[in-house]
Amino acid sequence: MDKQKFYITTAIPYTSGKPHVGNVYEAVLTDAIARQKRLAGYDVYFVTGTDEHGIKIEQKAKAAGITPKEYVDNVSGIIRGLWDMFEISYDKFIRTTDEDHIRVIQKIFNKLYEQGDIYKSCYEGNYCTPCESFWTDTQLVDGCCPDCGAKVTRASEEAYFFKLSKYADKLVEYYESNPDFFIPESRKNEMLNNFIKPGLQDLCVSRTSFTWGVPVEFDPKHVVYVWMDALPNYISALGYDPENPGELYKKYWPADLHVIGKDVVRFHTIYWPIFLLALGEPLPKTVLGHPWMLMNNEKMSKSKGNLLYGDDLIELFGLDAVRYYLLSELGLQNDGNISHDAIIARTNTDLANIFGNLVSRTASMIKQYFGGKIPAAAQRDELSTALETAIKAEVTEAKKLMDAYAYADASAHIISIFKLCNKYIDDTAPWTLAKDMDANGTRLATVMADLAEGIRSGIILFTPFIPDSVKKAAECFGYTDLSYESAGQWIYNASNGNIGAIPLLFKRIDKVAFDKMMKEKEEEAERKAEEGKISIDDFAKVSLVVGKVLECEPVPKSDKLLKLIVDIGTEKRQVASGIAKYYKPDELIGKKIILVENLKSAMLRGIKSSGMILAGGEGDNVKVIFADDSLPVGSKVR
């Protein structure tokens, strides 16, 4: 029988810079869902990737002195490397600069234009560069962008627009007939009350003020604007074509789940489904708009300087500890919080004390009492059956919550499985039973078999959270059945096998030692940051004065040097400067420059040079730093 398909995606992060751990959370959550669905027998296709066009990229590339493509190649590589570091099990990593994606966008744009859903007009409004969005005056908050808080600028340009309002009624009908479309459901009221009921404005879908984007085929001075370019990645990744959809598209579309941040819910539950309605394609089944991961109860941002990065956290705590924290901290409704202290506390309690200690204790007791051979259950009693019943209940609840994508809540029930096993150890006291193996051997064998079976059920459900640690625990006990449906079934799968190497899954973190290490790292970073820097006393030794260029001519037999005579008030100086490639002599005569006045003289191509002119730039872009004409010759520059 064919497996049931499950198509899942993340939002594609924008390649303006390295994502912080709050952005990484989305990829980890989506990965956990994909792993759970594969475990449950679904045919999963998981797409993630990067969004790479727009004016912000063009500006950042220009500032870096490289092409936009070079810029996004670098950042997309960083993001993909980070995803791989977190073992994100994607099937396709799409980039919006991929040629096949660009072709799809152009075909979609052409189709929507030809059928009258896109038209040309002129846009004038408040533009937010970070969000690449236009806003009306009434949408602004204190004159700033309502999404990110940045200052907006008035912008006016020719643009193409998409008729959003034409499909508003159909979209509302879809909301009403598909109650599972929004997770959490509260997002639905936000969209209806804040955007749809006040009236949808037609959407700007092209720009002419920058060139880094997908060209509109029939009007090449326009490039396709952000959401019309980015959102269709979910279908272009499957080989969609308006005339001839590919086999992957036919197999996996519509998406079963889009996993996105709450800040882009509007785009994924209004713009995106309306684009699909206009194309005549099925709409996604569910959009999960997760809350944010905060740091010290504030949204992470570069401007606040409160960023944590995923790779740094992995270096400090290990991959599975970070994955577990992210998945166990952030629920579906409320924002979560992250800090080093919080990760330490949860790692020590849930992972080291409860889970890791249980695996180590159980394996060690089997080695000590049964020579490493996992015994079969021989003498069950009320405690044994009560453990089975309680673990089955926890498994049922954890599965139900994972099916509802409530991973933080599910994690508590998985930890409860291990707590039950630890309590079972306390209640049965194996060390006491082992004192008289003749009388209690069969009972002790059942205790060990029960513990091995309880651990098996727990690690099956833990697989989407911490796959590496699950693998180590499974190898220790030699489980041969880790199927999803067998979790909670008391089948004693490991009995009669042998305990392998006992892993140290999670070591308790000494908070005092950790804080000391972090302080030493900070001090070392400060030391390195100060290396090569000069003191104010050192800088005071450099005498900078305003000078006026009286004469300037090329230095014979040199294509780099100009000879200048500079009046610095107290005297006239001769200076040789390597700026001949950038200036003609008459461009400098009469200009005021800044001269290093107390530099030792040097001979350059037979010319005595007594000073140095200040200039800035690199390569072919070098500019002399001219002084304001109102400054008197000989003025000290401080």
Image (tube, helix red, strand yellow):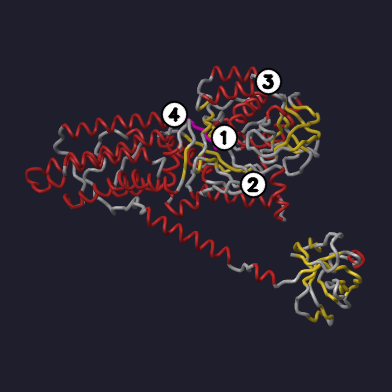
> Within 10 Å of the Cα at label 2, are there few (<14), some (14-19), or many (20+) other Cα atoms?
many
In the picture, measured across the screen, residue 598 lies left or right of residue 25, that is right
**Residue at horizontal 57 percent and vertical 34 percent from the top:** 248
Label 4 sits on what residue type?
Ala
Question: Which element carries disc 1, helix, strand or loop?
Answer: helix
Please tell me which of labels 2 and 4 falls first in the chain: 2
Instruction: Tell me the tag on residue 199.
Output: 3
Instruction: Tell me the tag on residue 404.
Output: 4
Label 1 sits on what residue type?
Leu
The residue identified by callout 1 is 248
The residue identified by callout 2 is 16
Instruction: Give the Cα distance between marks 1 and 3.
Output: 36 Å
Front of the two marks 1 and 3: 3
> Within 10 Å of the Cα at label 4, are there few (<14), some (14-19), or many (20+) other Cα atoms?
few
The quadrant the C terminus occupies is: bottom right
Range shown magenta:
1-10
> Within 10 Å of the Cα at label 3, are there few (<14), some (14-19), or many (20+) other Cα atoms?
few
In the rendered view, tell whether residue 493 sits above or below residue 587. Answer: above
In the picture, measured across the screen, residue 486 lies left or right of residue 9, that is left
Image-quadrant location for residue 280: top right
Please tell me which of labels 1 and 3 falls first in the chain: 3
In the rendered view, tell whether residue 171 sits above or below residue 3. Answer: above
Question: Which element carries disc 2, helix, strand or loop?
Answer: loop
Instruction: Give the Cα distance between marks 1 and 2.
Output: 30 Å
